[in-house]
Image (cartoon, helix red, strand yellow):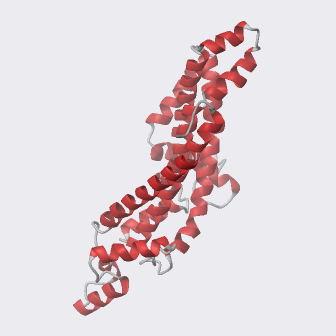
């Protein structure tokens, strides 16, 4: 187990290094932030002076080296547009994104997995057909379209919930459903498929032959052994929900990291772009590591070498 964790941590470090190189290069392709901060009448001296203040006067490899040395100390620099430390800017927005991501994650688990189990038990029934429709919509409808439709029906038409923003407790309902629907569909399909495989296995048939009740067979024996594929998907989900909420946050004007990332890209705010990407990468690989560790607890057959 210890050797496995060491290897995974080393993989995480390599992943972060590769991501930092890629985002450092891509962030500078879009343009120079000085073109937004200075007007058309700025002199060449003003241009150069601002470059010195922002650290853009140095060669790219030196800029990258300075960024990495500071990043190891938890300092991602200062946001060019907001004139604040990047870590403070991220801290002011990350909780809104975390709140939305956790709510969507739990909603996807609570809805998707039971629907998958029930669809497998009632294979071929109307309930199974309903589950297939839910999965089809979730995996085919674009999130921005789904968000707009939910906003139109339940916020504008019925007035049940606020259309946008993060104010009252019910403000999170529509963005939560929008963000989680594709993961509900994935959980449903994976759980249904895994349950069908397990229910057709020999030890389930043996348990039924011994007179074990149907509920015990399903929830005590089949359910636990069918959890591995949905667990993998759920682990990736947590990272994806944190990093993939950009569209949902824009549709519902949710003041989280997604909106912040778009603003950083439009304003060529290199330090903020780099900081957001590193934080997102840490969250994603951290969630993947947590899932790998949980495998051994759910399935004793898995051994770490």
User: Residue 215: image x %, image y %?
Assistant: 74, 19
Q: Is residue 201 above or below residue 55?
A: above
Near-viewer residue (12 or 21): 12
User: Residue 147: image x %, image y %?
Assistant: 51, 46
Q: Is residue 64 above or below residue 20?
A: below
Tell me which corner region of the image, top left, top right, bottom left or bottom right, holds residue 88: bottom right
User: Residue 278: image x %, image y %?
Assistant: 46, 62
- Residue 242 visible somewhere in the drawing: no
Near-viewer residue (71 or 293): 293
Please identify the residue farthest to the top as the structure is shown. 209
Q: Is residue 3 above or below residue 135?
A: below
User: Residue 190: image x %, image y %?
Assistant: 53, 29
Q: Quadrant of the N terminus?
A: top right
Near-viewer residue (295 or 74): 295
Residue at 62% of width from left, 60% of height from top? Answer: 166
Q: How many marks?
A: 0
Q: Is residue 225 above or below residue 97?
A: above
Residue at 50% of width from left, 78% of height from top? Answer: 85
Tell me which corner region of the image, top left, top right, bottom left or bottom right, holds residue 109: top right
């Amino acid at each position: 187990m210890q050797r496995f964790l060491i290897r995974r941590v080393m993989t995480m470090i390599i992943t972060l290094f590769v991501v930092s190189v890629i985002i450092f290069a891509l962030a500078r392709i879009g343009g120079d932030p000085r073109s937004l901060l200075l007007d058309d009448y700025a002199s060449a001296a003003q241009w150069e002076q601002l470059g010195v203040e922002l650290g853009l006067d140095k060669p790219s490899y030196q800029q990258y080296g300075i960024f990495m040395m500071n990043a190891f100390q938890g300092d991602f620099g200062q946001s060019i547009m907001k004139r604040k430390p990047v870590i403070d800017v991220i801290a002011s927005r990350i909780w809104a994104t975390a709140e939305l991501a956790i709510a969507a994650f739990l909603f996807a688990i609570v809805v998707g997995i039971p629907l998958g189990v029930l669809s497998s038990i009632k294979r071929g029934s109307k309930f199974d057909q309903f589950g297939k429709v839910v999965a089809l919509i979730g995996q085919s409808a674009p999130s921005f379209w789904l968000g707009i439709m939910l906003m139109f029906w339940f916020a504008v038409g019925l007035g049940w919930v606020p259309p946008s923003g993060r104010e009252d407790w019910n403000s999170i309902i529509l963005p939560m459903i929008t963000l989680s629907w594709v993961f509900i569909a994935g959980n449903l399909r994976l759980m249904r498929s895994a349950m069908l495989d397990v229910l057709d296995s020999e030890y389930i048939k043996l348990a039924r032959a011994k007179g074990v009740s149907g509920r015990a067979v399903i929830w005590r024996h089949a359910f636990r052994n069918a959890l591995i594929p949905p667990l993998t998907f759920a682990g990736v989900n947590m990272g994806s929900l944190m990093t993939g909420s950009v569209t949902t946050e824009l549709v519902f004007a949710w003041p989280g990291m997604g909106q912040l990332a778009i603003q950083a890209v439009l304003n060529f705010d290199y330090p903020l772009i780099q900081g957001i990407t590193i934080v997102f990468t840490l969250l994603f690989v951290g969630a993947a590591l947590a899932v790998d560790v949980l495998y051994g607890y759910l399935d004793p057959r898995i051994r770490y070498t």
